[in-house]
Every structure is written in structure tokens, then in C-alpha cells.
Image (cartoon, coloured by chain):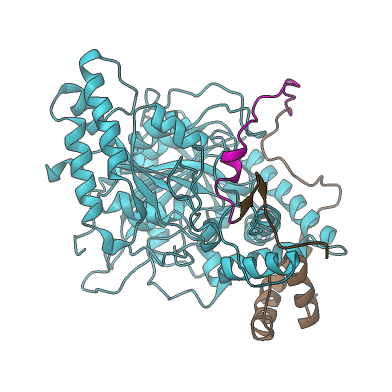
Chain colours: A cyan, B brown
Amino acid sequence: MAELTHLTIAELRDGFRAGDFSAREIAECYNAAVAGARALNAYTVETPDDALAAAAAADAGRGSGDLGPLAGIPLGIKDLFATKGVATTAGSKILGGFKPPYDSFVSANLRQAGAGMLGKLNMDEFAMGSSNETSTYGPVISPWRRAGSNVGLTPGGSSGGSAAAVAAGIAPGVTGTDTGGSIRQPAAFTGICGIKPTYGRCSRWGIVSFASSLDQAGPMAKTVRDCAILLEVMAGFDPRDATSLDLPVPKWEAGLSSNLSGKRVGIPKEYRIDGVPGEINALWDQGIAWLRDAGAEIVEISLPHTRYALPTYYIIAPAEASSNLARYDGVRYGLREEGVKTLDDMYAATRAAGFGPEVKRRIMIGTYVLSAGFYDAYFTKAQKVRALIKRDFAQAFERCDVILTPTAPSAAFGIGEKMSDPLAMYLNDVFAVPASLAGLPAMSVPGGLDSAGLPLGLHLIGPELDEQIVLNAGLAIEERAGFTATAEKWW
Amino acid sequence: MSVSPEQVRHIAKLARIAMSDAELDKLVPELNAIIGWVEQLGEVDTDGIEPLATVVDQKLRLRADVVDDGNIRDDVLANAPDAQHGFFAVPKVIE
């Protein structure tokens, strides 16, 4: 039943309900695919028994008609989500061996809906990275390769294992998290869909914290419809997260429509930046034509503070990270370095041994910008610029209903190509970060292949709480792009 | 502004991360490159702008003043590197 790995979640769901195949067949097929793809290093833990147990419950429930919306669907879970009794390490040595006694809100919702778990997915350490190279488990290798080359490429990051798993057909859908592009950039690099909802849609409870004012969970899958199906289950109010939105979850799947008549699509002139390959801008122009074809009116808009988004992000995110990661002290969970005399020395030795170079760099930056004498000059200043970036979007959405941009300034790059230059790595998220700072829903949808045969993504940004227009515009692109390319199996 | 090796040593101390001199030496130019880059925010006129801390406007909720969890000591301690007698154990703090 290898072809089951080619089906979308909607097709698996409907086929299972129609009796075309059993949940057990789906789970066995995916378990075998996972075990056969270890060369990708996408999973940090495999949980085939979990997938089989959920499948057994789904098969038993099919007779009675008592089925959750994701009955029969096995999923991959990013290693940032707490999963009861299953190692949850955020890709970090400092959380080595940590097995949470509880499930995150999001993963519990998926389980409640009938989904099984195939395993935990590799990621950049504490979600800090754009290439999955900062993981303590080593980099994920993208299933994609440049035409005629066997150079290992990154799947992007931080949700790199998640993206690679969907692209390689070793999970029909996965969870990701997005702090400054960590769902959208890897989705673009691997030719899949991924949506970051409005900040507060998905509870952060049980998600290992990176930068709390930015962190948002979201789904990644083959299609726009699959993302809508998963997001409906993942979202919802949770009193345990103080920033969780107390709002009903819209029926996004039922609301899907690619007819954009009467809708205006904003094209921000500031996103035409120097140094971006011509192919990226050409795809952007193609995306504009597709949305016009779907009935939308195209309007030029201005987001004047766009160029300040990345530096703003690289103050705010490290500042929040330095505070959040203070909890890793060798006392309550994870690694402890022994052989030092004092408590203070134990803290410092544990954190020195447990954090990788990128995490240390960001903790150091964050500690600096929050330290006495620099707080106002850096952190408060960045929060003010963040307010201006949010205002830019609010003003733009007076003139348009959704914004179209490229997702990333390049296609996937080679493993090791950018690790020596943190600033060059940070530029990966130049198009993704502004929507994160403004808390807006945003999605990447595959648009086509570049001349080397690698996927490129288009990026849709919607107004606060309007995931539907993002999904609908994504669907309009998906229908017109006809993106059916998949990575040729080499693993 | 740029940071000196002494400042970086101080930041590492505040962050409770032990660092060798070689690590500190490597980090100084890296941090200076990043700090120099983020300082372009100085160009932005932010007079009269309120700093943004919460991105989606919402009213903070109060929960009922009742105990809604607890009695999970063993769960809390289950992942501790060293737990003794129902407590987290740490190196001796007072001689």
C-alpha cells in the first residue's frame, strides 16, 4: 500500500471512512516509510506503536460511526511539543532524556481528534535556526536535491524535520512552530504548505518556549485543505495560556473557496529587495497573475518599516529567549553537569555543556539588550519599532484583504553553506518576520521550481484573525500552480 | 556601541554560561557584528510611539481563586537529575 503515502490527509480521511482501506493499513504504511527514511534524520524518536494504537481505535470506531475528525490519520509532531511519556528535547542536549508527564494543548487536541503519532520531528535547537543545522541530533537532510547533484541540502528551519517528513512522504501532516518564519521558510524549501495562524489561535501550553510574544504553532501538509483540517483541530481557547484567544474556531475547511472576486491583493513594494534571485521575483509576478485570474484586484501597498523588521526581531526574540531559557539550570529536568563545587558553577557548567553555539549566541545577545543601561536603547526601542511595523500592516489592510510576497529570498541551500555567518542565515526570514512581529496569519504555498529543480514558495499574509482569506488565496494559487513535483527518492 | 571582551565576560556571567577565554574571544566579533546591525533601528523615528508588548489586543483574564492542580509531586520530580526525599537536590549552598 505504498501509494497511501501519496494521498493527502483529506483523501486518507475520506478513504478510511469509505472503507477503501483501514487505519491500520495507513499506520503500517507510514511506519514502514518512516523506518525506511532514517537517512533524512527527520525523526528524533519513532513511535510506531502509538500510530498503531490510534489506528486500532479508529478501526474499532468506524463500525460505530464514533470517529474524531482525524481518526485514522497518523501525524509527526515537532520535538518542541510536550508529548506524554515520549522524549521532548527541543533539539537540545540540555533537555536530554526529558519525558514530559503531560501533553501539550495542541498535541492533546490532535490525539483527542483521533490522530496517532508517528514520532517526534527534528528541529533547530530551541527553534533557533533557519536550516535545521543547530539541532543536537545533527541536520535534517532535505529529500530534495538540485538537478544532477547529490549535494545535501537543508530543508530549512526551524521546523526542518517537519518539512522534510511531509515532502518525503513519511508523514501526511505534521505540527510546526513559527517564531519568525519557522513554518513558512521550510515549507517553501520543501514544496509543501504551512500556515502560521494569528498569534493566540493555538495555545502555547506545553510548547517549549523560545520567544513567547512571537511563538505560534501551526500545521504543515501537502495541501491547503490539509492545513485547514489540521488547524481546526490544533486551534482553540486554553485558559492555561494567558495569551490564548477566547474565540470560537472557524470552520476553515468548509469555508475554503478559491474565488477571490471582490478581494484586493496587496503587493508591498518594499519586498522587492536587492540581491534576491530573478527567479524569486518572477514567481512573485506569476503569483500576482494567478490571483488576478482568481478574480482578485491587485493593489500596490507600502509597508515602510519592512527593512527594520529583522533587526527588531533579533532584539526581541533573543531577549525573550534569554529570559525563557533561564529555566535550564540543571535542577529540575534535563542535563546536569557534575563535578563542580558550587550551585552557581553547576548552573554555568550545565548551560555551557547543554546549549549549542547558536543558542548561546542568542542568550548572550538577549542578556545584553536587557541588561541595565542598555534596556531602553535596544529592547524598548525594538518594541516601539514593532508597534510601527504592526501599524504598517493595519494601514495596508485598509486598502487590501490579503498580501502576497515571496516566502524566502532563495531556494534551499546546501548544508554548511551559511553556518559560518549568522547574519546571512538570519536574512532567510526577511519576508517572514514582519508578519510574525505583527502577529498576523501567514502561509507558504508552493509556486513552482527554480532552474535547479528546487521548490519555491509564495507567501500570503492576512489581517488579524482572518486565516480564511489566507487559506483561500493559498488555494487559488495551489489550483493554478498545479504543483505536483515531489523529491525523487534517493534515501 | 560595541562590546569589549570584558563586557562579554560579564554578560556570560549574567547568563550563567561558563566560557573559556577562547570562546569569549570568538564571541566578541560575532556579537559586535549583530549589535552593529541591530543598531540601524536608531534611524527610526519612534517619538511618541508606545512600545508594543502584546501583539493581539486582548483583555487579561482573571481565573477563579481556587486550587486547580497540585498533588503531583512525583510527576514534578520525575525528570530531576537528582531528587531526594521528595525534593530537588542541588550542590551544597551553605558550608
Q: Classify residue A167 as left or right of residue A408.
A: left
Q: Is residue A224 visible?
A: yes
Residue located 37% across and 63% down the image = A140
Comparing A116 with B61, the one in front is A116
Residue at 48 percent of width and 62 percent of height: A130
Quadrant of the rendering where the C terminus of chain A is positioned:
bottom left
Residue A285 visible in image: no
Which is nearer the eye, A468 or B75?
Answer: B75
Whole-percent x and y of residue A278? Answer: 40, 66
- Residue B20: percent from left, percent from top: 67, 82
Is A312 above or below relative to A277?
above
* Dominant secondary structure, magenta: loop
Horizontal and vertical percent for residue A21?
A: 14, 30
Give me the residue at 53% from left, 57% from top: A95
Residue B61 shown in magenta = yes
Residue closest to the far top: A64
Q: Does the magenta stretch include residue A318?
A: no
Quarter of the image for the N terminus of chain A: give it. Answer: top left
Residue range corresponding to the magenta coloring? B60-81
Total marks shown come to 0
Check the image and report above or below for A313 versus A355.
Answer: above
Residue placed most toward the observer, A424 or A397: A424
Return the residue nearer the eye: A482 or A274.
Answer: A482
Question: In screen coordinates, is B63 left or right of A439?
Answer: right
| Residue in the picture at 26% in, 20% down | A61
Q: x, y percentage for residue A290?
A: 35, 43
